[in-house]
Image: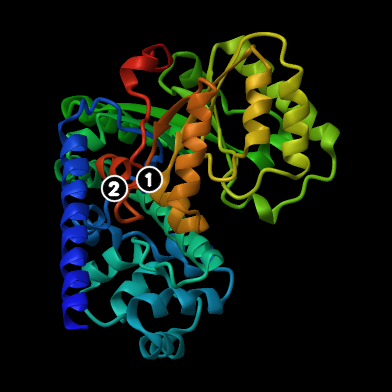
Amino acid sequence: PLSSKGAKLKSFKKTKKVEMKLKYVLILSVIFMKLSASNFHDHLFSIPFAKNFSRVASSIFRIPSKELKLTDFFKNEDELTNFIEVRWGKPAALIFTHQGGFKQSLIDLCLSMPGDPSHNLERILTLESNEKTAVPLRQKEYIAIEDMRKKILLALPADDFEEVYRGYFRSDPLCNRRYISAAVTRRFFTESQDEKRERLMALAIKENTRLVYRVSLQREELMDDGVKFPNHVMDLLLNKSIGAIDVVGSLRENQYSYPDVKLVQSRIRELFDFVRQHHISLVFHLFETCNNDNFYQGLEDVLRLVDRPLQIEVGHIARLDDRWIDIFASNPNLDMMFHVNVVSNMRLHGLTIEKLRETVFNLRQKGFKVVPGSDGRGILPSSSYVEQKVILACPLDDIAMISARCE
């Protein structure tokens, strides 16, 4: 009956109004809350927005092509073609590959694609795939973009490097960057990069941002060589110019195998002894892709036997389950803190927000601290501190509660 349809329509409109009011209340509550905690987890070269790079596009285009070969970022032409199709469509991809093939550089790609080269650079350095794109393709795209940014920023002169980050600080609200703890390749800590590193730290201080560098240690390097750093890096760790060691490699962890569990155990024990001996903070990228292989078995065996106080920050909770939460909680010598990277885990791993909320709740129920991170602020859209807190819509810990870890 018509009257019934009218009642349903009225009820639907009322429901939508309530939903909108709740949304605005949530957004306002986040905006007006104490915004002192911000980004505890990111990668330094993934923080600036693509538009910040385009500010120095002319300098980027002067970087020798041999330093930005597309073969450095894509394993084969199919990967490159998929990457281009997302941005310019299949016809443009075919034009490009027919024009010059796969051996061209990033700069050649920017110049050969339709449109302004600076705008093309922005498109290349931002993840444009969406939920319709298969997760493995999203991950490959992200990894390629991250590698491009790394090579660009290591190659840029100090003035242009600083300009990229100055643009970021000016364009991102302070609440998103009041505290930034960012992993970066050890190549950034060579003497040739000293001026960039010092300028960036001075810029962060000027912009009221607390920036903490974490030097990356790849899992594969840890397994092959143990805990080894160049002398210059070691000096910076000891004088606290580098705030932590960050064991990375979880995004690609399903691509590797660790047949020797005893080697994993030995290397992890060596790492724990090293950070204790030198009083160095430790961040461990875990649970981004899986939680059960020989690497995790070796880690579990060592964690259960830790017999002295040890602080560890865990860089992801995507695949963290109740069994692992119980493992961490079972040893009173472990002082754990966990990073939740909402948009990253949703976009790169297809994880649901409900699963992340549940894991955050379970961790906090066990007394663990959970802090927010963006994990690719400049690559992934909607990954700011405020936006992620709105999406997550559950309590996270404030920097004031964990000040001891930040000293």
Residue 352 is tagged as none
Say what secondary structure mark 1 lies in: helix
Say which residue label 1 marks: 45
> Residue at image x 19%, y 39%?
169
Q: Position of residue 131 (x, y in %)?
A: 43, 67
Q: Is residue 190 visible to us here? A: no
Q: Is residue 280 left or right of residue 277?
A: left
Q: Nearer the viewer, residue 1 or 320?
A: 1
Q: What is the quadrant of the C terminus in the image?
A: top left
How would you rate the neighbour count of disc 1 (Cα within 10 Å): few for under 14, some for 14-19, many for 20 or more?
Answer: many
> Residue at image x 31%, y 72%?
110
Res 326 → quadrant: top right
Q: Position of residue 281 (x, y in %)?
A: 51, 19
Query: For the residue marked with disc 1, what is the amino acid?
Result: Phe
Res 175 → quadrant: top left
> Residue at image x 44%, y 57%?
347
Q: Does residue 207 sit above or below 99 in this rendering?
A: above
Q: What is the quadrant of the N terminus in the image?
A: bottom left
Tags 2 and 1 touching, CB below 8 Å: yes
> Residue at image x 31%, y 56%?
381
Q: Does residue 391 sit above or below 179 in this rendering?
A: below
Q: CA distance from mark 2 to mark 1?
A: 7 Å
Q: Is residue 136 left or right of residue 63?
A: right
Q: Nearer the viewer, residue 82 or 302?
A: 302
Q: Position of residue 255 (x, y in %)?
A: 68, 56
Say which residue label 2 marks: 48
Q: Is residue 255 left or right of residue 108?
A: right
Say what secondary structure mark 2 lies in: loop
